[in-house]
Image (cartoon, rainbow, N blue to C red):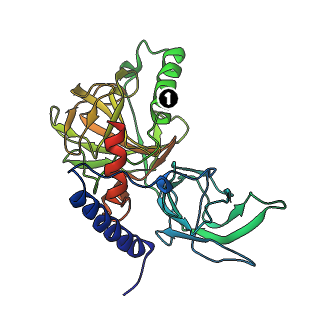
C-alpha cells in the first residue's frame, strides 16, 4: 500500500482521540485542555515539498498531492522540530500560505499555488534562524505540473454595469480583501467539505475568458448554474466575514474557515447569513440569483488561501484538509 503523509497523521489522530477520551472519562465531563505544547511556533509563511534532506538536516518536509498543478492546494507537514528552534521556510514561486498549526513537534499548513505559476521545479528550504549563521534543516524541490485551462469568449450587455464607478468598485475590492484577511488562527472547518449548490458547472476554475472583446481575464472560482431561488449552503463550518450587496459580485457572502482559508458565494438572490454569525456545514446562507455582473442565475463559488484563489473542486477530497479533531474541538470551544 502506498503511504501518504496523512497515513502518519491518521495514527496521530487515533492517539489524540484515545488520550482525549481517557481524560474525559477521568474528569468531570468537561473536555480537558490540550497541553501548552499545542500552541503555534513562530514560523514565517512558507511552501514545502517532499522530504529530501541535506547535510546536518534535523527536519523533514512532506507535501500532498505529490504533483500539484497551478491552482492546487498543497498540504504541508514539517518536523520534527526542536522546541527551542525558530524556523523559516523559503520558497520561490507564486502563491500563498495559510496560517499554521502545531501538534507536538510537527507543524501543518495549507499552501495555494497561484493559477499563473509556470510549470517546473521550485526550491524550498527549512531554515533554522535560531543560530548564526542560519542552518538549512531540510531542502527539497516541488515540481508544478502542467495544466490546461478552458477558454471562452462571450458578451455582457452594457446595462449590467450602468451607474458603476471606479471608486465604488475599488471600495468593494477592499471589502473583499479585508474579509479574506480577517481569519481565526486555527481551523474552524470540521470533516469534509460539501458542494454548496446542486447544478451544472457553467464556467470552470482558472478559465481564460474574453468578455466583450476586452483583454483576457482569469476566472477565480466555479460558476454553478441553477434555478433562481435554489438554496445555497455553507460548504463547511466558519464565521461570516462579509454579508453585503456589491456591484460586481451582487449579493455576496464570505465565510472564514480559519487559518486564512475562506469561501465566497456571489450573485445570490437572497442572503440569510449575517456578518459575524457562526454557520455550520450544510446551513443555508442564501439562494441562487443573478445579482451583480451576471446574465443568468448561477452561483459564483470561490475558495481562497488569503487572497490567492484555488480550485474549489479539490475540497471534495476527504483527506485533503484533514484536521486532528482533538485540536479542533478544543480551539472551537475556546473561541466560542
Question: Residue lying farthest top?
Answer: 163
Q: Choose between 95 and 157: the one closer to the eye.
A: 95
Within 10 angstroms of label 1, few (less than 14), some, or many (20 or more) residues? some
Instruction: Please tell me which residue is depicted at 84% across the width and 61% down the height of the picture.
Output: 133
Residue 103 point in image, percent of width and height: 46, 61
Within the image, what quadrant is residue 227 found in? top left
Question: Residue lying farthest bottom?
Answer: 1
Q: Is residue 210 left or right of residue 87?
A: left
Q: Which residue is identified by label 1?
A: 178
Q: In the rendered view, tell whether residue 186 sits above or below residue 322.
A: above
Instruction: Please tell me which residue is depicted at 34% across the width and 70% down the height of the picture.
Output: 15
Q: Could you tell me how many numbered marks the image carries?
A: 1
Q: Is residue 12 left or right of residue 130?
A: left
Within the image, what quadrant is residue 60 found in? bottom right
Q: In the rendered view, tell whether residue 105 sits above or below residue 111.
A: below
Query: Does residue 324 appear anywhere in the picture?
Result: yes
Within the image, what quadrant is residue 50 found in? bottom right
Residue 92 point in image, percent of width and height: 69, 57
Q: In the rendered view, tell whether residue 79 sits above or below residue 198.
A: below
Q: Is residue 124 left or right of residue 158?
A: right
Q: Choose between 248 and 323: the one closer to the eye.
A: 323
Q: Secondary structure at mark 1?
A: helix
Residue 34 point in image, percent of width and height: 39, 54
Quarter occupied by the C terminus: top left
Quarter occupied by the N terminus: bottom left
Amino acid at each position: 500500500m502506498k503511504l501518504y503523509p496523512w497515513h502518519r497523521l491518521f495514527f496521530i489522530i487515533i492517539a489524540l482521540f484515545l488520550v482525549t477520551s481517557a481524560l474525559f472519562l477521568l474528569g468531570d465531563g468537561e473536555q480537558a485542555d490540550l497541553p501548552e505544547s499545542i500552541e503555534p511556533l513562530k514560523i514565517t509563511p512558507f511552501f514545502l515539498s517532499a522530504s529530501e534532506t541535506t547535510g546536518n538536516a534535523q527536519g523533514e518536509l512532506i507535501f500532498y498531492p505529490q504533483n500539484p498543478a497551478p491552482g492546487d492546494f498543497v498540504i504541508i507537514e514539517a518536523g520534527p522540530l526542536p522546541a527551542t528552534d525558530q524556523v523559516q521556510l523559503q520558497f520561490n514561486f507564486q502563491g500563498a500560505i495559510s496560517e499554521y498549526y502545531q501538534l507536538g513537534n510537527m507543524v501543518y499548513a495549507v499552501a495555494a499555488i497561484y493559477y499563473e505559476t509556470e510549470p517546473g521545479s521550485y526550491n524550498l528550504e527549512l531554515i533554522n534562524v535560531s543560530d548564526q549563521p542560519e542552518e538549512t534543516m531540510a531542502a527539497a524541490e516541488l515540481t508544478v505540473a502542467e495544466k490546461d485551462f478552458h477558454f471562452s469568449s462571450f458578451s455582457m450587455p452594457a446595462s449590467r454595469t450602468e451607474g458603476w464607478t471606479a471608486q465604488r468598485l475599488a471600495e468593494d475590492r477592499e471589502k473583499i480583501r479585508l474579509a479574506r484577511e480577517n481569519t481565526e488562527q486555527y481551523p474552524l472547518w470540521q470533516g469534509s467539505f460539501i458542494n454548496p449548490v446542486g447544478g451544472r458547472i457553467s464556467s470552470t476554475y482558472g478559465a481564460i475568458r474574453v468578455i466583450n472583446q476586452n483583454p483576457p481575464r482569469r476566472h477565480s472560482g466555479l460558476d454553478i448554474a441553477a434555478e433562481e431561488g435554489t438554496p445555497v449552503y455553507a460548504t463547511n463550518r466558519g464565521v461570516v466575514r462579509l454579508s453585503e450587496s456589491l456591484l460586481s459580485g451582487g449579493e455576496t457572502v464570505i465565510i472564514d474557515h480559519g487559518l486564512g482559508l475562506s469561501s465566497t458565494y456571489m450573485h445570490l438572490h437572497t442572503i440569510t447569513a449575517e456578518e459575524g454569525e457562526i454557520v455550520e456545514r450544510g446551513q443555508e446562507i442564501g439562494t441562487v440569483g443573478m445579482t451583480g455582473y451576471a446574465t443568468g442565475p448561477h452561483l459564483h463559488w470561490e475558495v481562497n488561501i488569503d487572497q490567492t484563489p484555488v480550485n474549489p473542486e479539490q475540497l471534495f477530497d476527504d483527506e485533503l484538509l484533514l484536521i486532528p479533531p482533538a485540536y479542533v474541538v478544543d480551539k472551537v470551544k475556546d473561541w466560542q
